[in-house]
Image (cartoon, grey):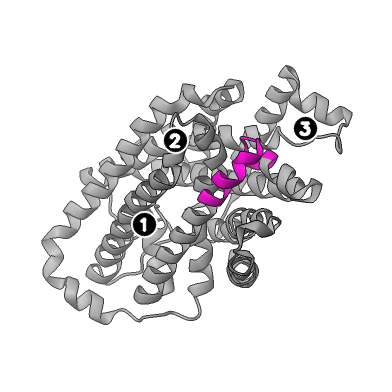
Amino acid sequence: MIAMPFYLHSAGLGAGLLFFLLSMILAADAAVLTHRLRIMGPNTYVALMRKAVGPKGEILAVACVLLAGWGSAVAWIKFIGDNLARFLPFHLPSQGYIAIVMMPLFCCAWVDEITVLERFSYMGLLAGQLFVILLVILATPHWEEFPSYLAAQPFLRYKSFPVAMGLAVFCNEGLVVMSPEVSASMSHPETFAISVALAVTYFSVNYLLMSLCGDFLYSYVAHDAVAQEVTLSSAFTVTPTHQAMVLCYVLQLLLTFPSSLFVMFRNVEQLGAGSWCNSHFTHFRRSACGGRCWRVVLILSFSAVAMVLPRFGDFLAVFGALANSLCIYILPHWAFSKDASHGRKFTSWLVMLVFGLCCGGLAAVVSLQKLF
């Protein structure tokens, strides 16, 4: 969410709004597809792809979940370190805050049930909502300039639109990957599609408010460029309101991040549950001691990379384009198209080719060039 003003500015106003809404609709569709596939039995994304597509689908699913989860972990820890270093008065470098945050994250290696994290996620959602509300309040005194802002924005920015595509896709991966487990835990799974529609509507409204208000306030009103992290824009100065907003968003990440980590751990640990891969490493990783060890190593790895990462937004765009495009636009539709009885093979192949391969590939190439 924090990169959405930069996304909108990079895409152009009209193209950015249209592509974001389309990406949310396609993500909701992919989530519903995985729910419909869950009648085959498995209740995790990776296990579902193994059942529907076979070993190749399982390997791709694990790679996507691991890359997307690892990439988001690096990016958010980088965000926390950079912003606490700027907005707190303790004169610690970003790397110091990352090392501090890394300590409680190790506790995630010992979480075995996502229900433990639900209450924290609700509080994190409330903190994120407060961030958006404060941003809208800050933009309100300038609303008389909003029509001029809309008129001044180009419909499409050709050069930076590919990077924007990767950022838009990054928002939606969790919705799809978590859908089998959410569906399995519902007392009335027949309401899953309605629940997804409501969730997507809620998040879309907040993302669009964040995009429009952030770009309007810190780019147009400030006569400056909005940063990849809107909180690091030049106009996002160190004031009490901005400090409160940063602390709200950091709190939201710290409270919701463990749930994302758990989903990544759970799905990767499904690798090799079938007979095709029954190696000693698989037994080690799925054992109590081995499972804790590999989780700790993973937490160490993304914390270390966050300490040396140069830019937040381009990194998100690369991983969104690569892993999330596969998770959302390719694997669910590939699995669903295996069953000809569903009668939507053409639609699934169209989504895979246009959004998965063409859009995802273009966004990945351009984002990689900008990252390095």
Point 24% across, 52% down: residue: 135
Assign a secondary structure to mark 3: loop
Q: Is residue 44 left or right of residue 4?
A: right
Task: Kindly identify which numbered label has been placed on residue 230.
Answer: 1
Assign a secondary structure to mark 1: helix
Task: Kindly identify which numbered label has been placed on residue 256.
Answer: 2
Amino acid type indicated by mark 2: Thr
- The image position of residue 228, as x and y in percent, is 44, 60
Q: CA distance from mark 3 to mark 2?
A: 28 Å
Question: Residue farthest to the front?
Answer: 341
Task: Kindly identify which numbered label has been placed on residue 113.
Answer: none
- The image position of residue 146, as x and y in percent, is 18, 71
Please tell me whether the stretch drawn in magenta is mainly helix, strand or loop.
Answer: helix
Q: Give the vertical position of 350 relative to 152 (above or below).
A: above
**Mark 3 / mark 1, whichever is N-terminal:** 1
Choose mark 1 or mark 2, whichever is in front: 2
Q: CA distance from mark 3 to mark 1?
A: 42 Å
Question: Contact (CB < 8 A) between labels 1 and 2?
Answer: no
- The image position of residue 351, as x and y in percent, is 59, 67
